Amino acid sequence: GENVEQHPSTLSVQEGDSAVIKCTYSDSASNYFPWYKQELGKGPQLIIDIRSNVGEKKDQRIAVTLNKTAKHFSLHITETQPEDSAVYFCAASYPGANNLFFGTGTRLTVIP
Amino acid sequence: EAQVTQNPRYLITVTGKKLTVTCSQNMNHEYMSWYRQDPGLGLRQIYYSMNVEVTDKGDVPEGYKVSRKEKRNFPLILESPSPNQTSLYFCASSFGRAREQYFGPGTRLTVT
């Protein structure tokens, strides 16, 4: 099965700075890599995802990069704002998998 | 509004007292899943269902049961809860397995 590792477990940044969260995966067949944001008291919500046929995807201040050779992918948040404070989960999945394999989460705190 | 609902949101119970956490979705999703979230361990899948009357074990199924008699509902049953089942539980649904999942708001369970 797939194993996803996520770092760091906690991250504090000043408002306006960038934040980067990194994940590695073990199964070279994995081809789908979503990122979820979990705000306090809520369930995780998909914020961006990338498939293995592209190396980078952007959506306003959020971007995800994928390095298939090294089997790692990263979430980049630019110009961070206090509302970006949350727990972020990466995940991976391969064709035929019955579920997403989640990382252990990163608690991001944006300091005003 | 498209959503996944869970009830109850909070539950404190005693060891051995059977309980059910309900989950319902209004998006006509085939795939539904239960996760538990524990500090440092991320989201771990308990059970999943590909469609009505089709269920299977996830990574941590011990001590749990599920049923899928209707497409919209996927209850989680703890027949004899134990303190190690104290956790935050999430139900999720999606059109396809292992793809964009919509999570419920969570149920915080405490077993004393």
Image (cartoon, grey):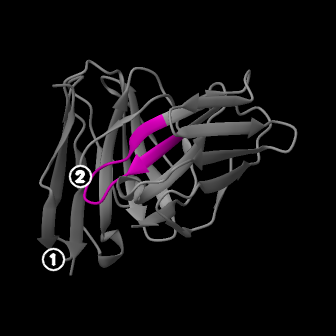
Question: Does the residue at mark 2 contact the one at mark 1 (Cβ under 8 Å)?
Answer: no
**Does residue A28 lie above or below A81 as drawn?**
above
Amino acid residing under circle 2: Ile
Q: Residue at x 52, y 42 (%)?
A: A35
Residue A44 sits inside the magenta stretch: yes
How far apart are the alpha carbons under marks 2 and 1? 15 Å
Q: Is residue A5 left or right of residue B22?
A: right
Part of the protein shown in magenta: A35-47
Q: Chain of mark 1?
A: B
Chain bearing mark 2: B
Looking at the rendered structure, the kind of residue marked 1 is Val
Q: Nearer the viewer, residue A13 or B26?
A: A13
Q: What residue does disc 1 label?
A: B14
Look at mark 2 in the image and give the residue it sits on: B77
Dot 1, crowdedness within 10 Å: few (<14), some or many (≥20)?
few
Q: Please, is residue A75 above or below residue B93 in the view?
A: below
In terms of depth relative to the viewer, which is nearer, A62 or B40? A62
Residue B111 found in image quarter: bottom left
Q: Residue, x 48% and y 27% (percent of image)?
A: B97
